[in-house]
Amino acid sequence: DGEYERIQRLPPGARQPLADVAMPALRRLPRETRAALLRTAHLLVAADGRVTVREFLLFSILKRRLGPEASQPVAVKFDSLLPLASEAGLVLSLVAEVRLPERAEHAFNAGLLLLRGIDPAFVPAAAVRLDDVSAALTRLNELAPLAKPQLIKAATAVAFVDDETNWQAASTLRMICAALDAPLPPQVLQVEAG
């Protein structure tokens, strides 16, 4: 079997960790090769005429890690989540829709409890636009490092609502952490370990 066939046989939740392992080698590629890889990834994502949440998040991370801005540090513009309440609400809503689509607001509320003094609104699935999620993640990445754990803990509470999760929610949480240059919650590593 070739590499592609072996990767296709991996459990879906194992594919994002594999991409993380490959990232240092991909970063060492020449700029032109990285640009060609991003163009190919974009074509693959758009090939079937629709973009899933996981495709969108994975491409966003590839762009951040391999694009022209990859070597530039992110400037800190926000000391707390307070001015980014709507962005936090959108990201938590996205995780909630992936984790528990039939009761997404219930999942969202589990994260809301950890956002002390911040009261973002729940965004229903029909109103979640991936372009808005991308813009929200860009702004949230401008949080001071010490302010990011509050958001990650809230997103983790959503992904693990009712003390359960699914690989889609765990994978979405992993990708959000990557987009925010934040460490992975240990719960995600435990899920991926089986």
Image: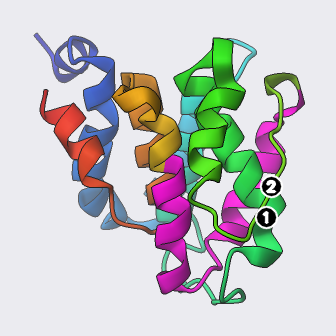
What is the chief secondary structure element of the magenta stretch?
helix
Q: Give the tally of numbered discs.
A: 2
The amino acid pointed to by label 1 is Ala
Secondary structure state at the residue bearing disc 2: loop
**Quadrant holding the C terminus:** top left
Nearest the eye: 48 or 145: 145
Q: Which residue is mark 1?
A: 85
Would you place residue 91 above or below residue 54 in this image?
below
Does 105 sit left or right of 15 as displayed?
Answer: right
Nearest the eye: 62 or 108: 108
Mark 2 and 1 residues: CB-CB less than 8 Å, in contact? yes
Quarter of the view holding residue 138: bottom right
Residue at the right extreme?
127
Residue 150 forms part of the magenta stretch: yes
Highlighted magenta segment, given as a residue range: 127-155
> Which residue is drawn at the image coordinates 65% and 51% (left, top)?
112
> Which residue is drawn at the image coordinates 27% and 45% (left, top)?
187
- Provide residue 55's location: percent of width, then percent of height: 56, 31
- Provide residue 167's location: percent of width, then percent of height: 36, 24
**Residue 59, which numbered label?**
none
Would you place residue 115 above or below residue 187 in this image?
below
- Provide residue 134's location: percent of width, then percent of height: 72, 52
> Which residue is drawn at the image coordinates 66% and 11% (left, top)?
102
Q: Which residue is mark 2?
A: 120
